[in-house]
Each structure stands twice: as C-alpha cells, then as structure tokens.
Amino acid sequence: AVVSTQSGHYGRDTNYILSLAMQIFVQGTSTHAMSVTPDTKVEEVRKRICTLEQVPYEDLYFHYAGVPLDDDISFESIPDLSTIVASGKLLGGKVHGSLARAGKVKGQTPKVAAMEDKKKPKTGRCKRRIQYNRRFSTAVSQFGRKKGPNSNSA
C-alpha cells in the first residue's frame, strides 16, 4: 500500500511504501524463502511451490505446527519468519485392528502373586561342612535302626 504523507524533513511530500510483506519458509525437498502479505492465501503459495518442486497440485499439502493448512486460510494468523512444511500425499488405508483393542490380552489376564525366591542349594565347602556336622559331630550313636534326616523323634 502506498501512503502519502507530509514530511517535516526538507518541506516536501514523500511517498512511503508500507512494508506489510512478511517472509515465510516453505520446507519441501528443499527450503524456499517466500515473501507474502498477510492477506495472501495459502492456495497461491501452494501453486508457486508446486511449480518449483514440480509436484501435482493435488499431491502437495501444507502443515504449520503439525496442523494442516486449508487453501482459503490467509497468512495473517501465521507469524513472520515461520516455517511451513510441504509434504506429499501419504498413501495408506485402514490399519489392521483398532487401537481401542490394544492391550486386550494383558488387560484380561488375571494377576498372579509373585512367587517367593527359593533358597539356592549350598555347594562346595559349605555343603561338605554341613554334611560332616550332621553325620559325625552332633550324631549320637544309637542301637537299632538308623533314623532318616527328616525324622522329628528324639
């Protein structure tokens, strides 16, 4: 926009061009710097990028801050020096299964209390020491039949 003002400097009229242009960056296969005005529509920039990147118009989508931009949106809501991501159309379809059923099996499996750790059997010198004490040092010689190790009778 051209604004005509009366300048106090040197007593002459001067035309000032208001710089409403803002710069945005469009990141595609390469990054493009573009000057736009706040009332420029996304559709215009998208057409320019399509010719630069040599991509069909239908296959190019713009995203800003993770949100897709529609063609009828103007750049007044986007701050100056922002980066807009231009991406191609993603092919795909239905995902097998739905996320609503994720973790179904784990959720319906009953919780079983953890088992206590079993004592590990003694080995080596320690085992032989216990065996010696059991057989010879505390054993009382008895007459008759020998009692087993698990016998509780005295």
Image (spheres, rainbow, N blue to C red):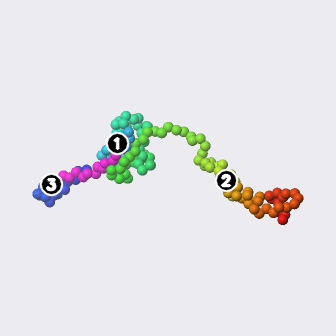
Which image quarter is the C terminus in?
Answer: bottom right
Chain-order first, disc 2 or disc 1: 1
Badge 1 marks a residue whose secondary structure is strand
Viewer-nearest residue: 79 or 18: 79
* Apparent side of residue 37 relative to residue 100 in the rendered image (left or right): left
Chain-order first, disc 3 or disc 1: 3
Query: Do residues under tags 3 and 2 come within 8 Å of each other at their CB atoms?
Result: no
The percent coordinates of residue 65 (x first, y second) are 42, 50
Magenta span of residues: 15-26
Viewer-nearest residue: 79 or 106: 106
**Image point 50% across, 37% down: which residue?**
91
Chain-order first, disc 3 or disc 2: 3
> Magenta span has 17?
yes
> Magenta span has 94?
no
- The residue identified by callout 2 is 124
Viewer-nearest residue: 90 or 30: 30
Badge 2 marks a residue whose secondary structure is helix
